[in-house]
Amino acid sequence: MNPTDILRHEHEVILMVLGAAEREAGRIEEALPVDGDKVAQVLEFSRQFVDRCHHAKEEKFLFPKMRERSPLAAAGPLSVMLGEHDEGRRLVREIAELLPPARNGDPAALKNLAEKLVFYVDLLDAHIDKEDNVLFPLADNVLRPEDQKALLAAFEKIEAEELGEGVHEKYHHLAHELAEQKG
């Protein structure tokens, strides 16, 4: 297993949660009551798993190593990826701000919440597609075996130190729970 395999697997987990977010946006658009707890779980997952774990692995370790090994080839794709990470963080903040008034039934907040959830899902869907089909093949081409080994160790360190023991698995479990909820 190489570092990009780990990141691709995390993408699969992220896509499960995005499916739950998309279903919730659809419920809100159908004028059904917002499931504030589900949206809060999506936000927690996005902040902890997506940002503190997955994006941290990319931003702190993978991207810098790619820049080192292939500065010209990596420059364009990496700037796009970093911009999309920032855009995702902005959308998560906006969703969090909209959640309290949406829970209280504010029609404008509900409409905006559904829109922001869809924007977030669309952003990350497209982002994951670019990473899986453009960035990660580039990484697999330019990274040396010793880079791959060092990245695997760095990824383990992030999971242990940034998140804490067992937290990575906790978010995998949450993703599966959210994916299984159909309403």
Image (cartoon, rainbow, N blue to C red):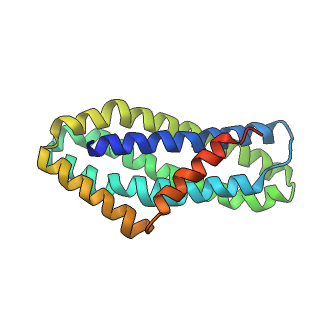
Left or right of 61 on screen, residue 133? right
Left or right of 5, for residue 91: right
Query: At x 45% / y 41%, what residue is drawn?
Result: 11
Quarter occupied by the C terminus: top right
Q: Is residue 110 or residue 46 the one in the foreground?
A: 46
Q: Quadrant of residue 71?
A: top left
Residue 124, image x, y percentages: 51, 41
Is residue 60 among what the camera can see? Answer: no
Closest to the observer, 164 or 46: 164
Q: Quadrant of residue 165?
A: bottom left
From where the camera sits, is residue 168 visible? yes
x and y percentages locating residue 9 in the rendered image: 41, 41
Q: Residue at 32% across / 59% down in the picture?
A: 156
Measured along the vertical axis of the image, is residue 147 above or below residue 5?
below
The image position of residue 131, as x and y in percent, is 37, 37
Of the pair 64 and 150, the residue shown nearer to us: 150
**Residue 173 in picture, x, y percent from top left:** 57, 52
Q: Residue at x 51, y 36 (%)?
A: 125
| Residue visible at 50% across and 43% down in the picture | 13
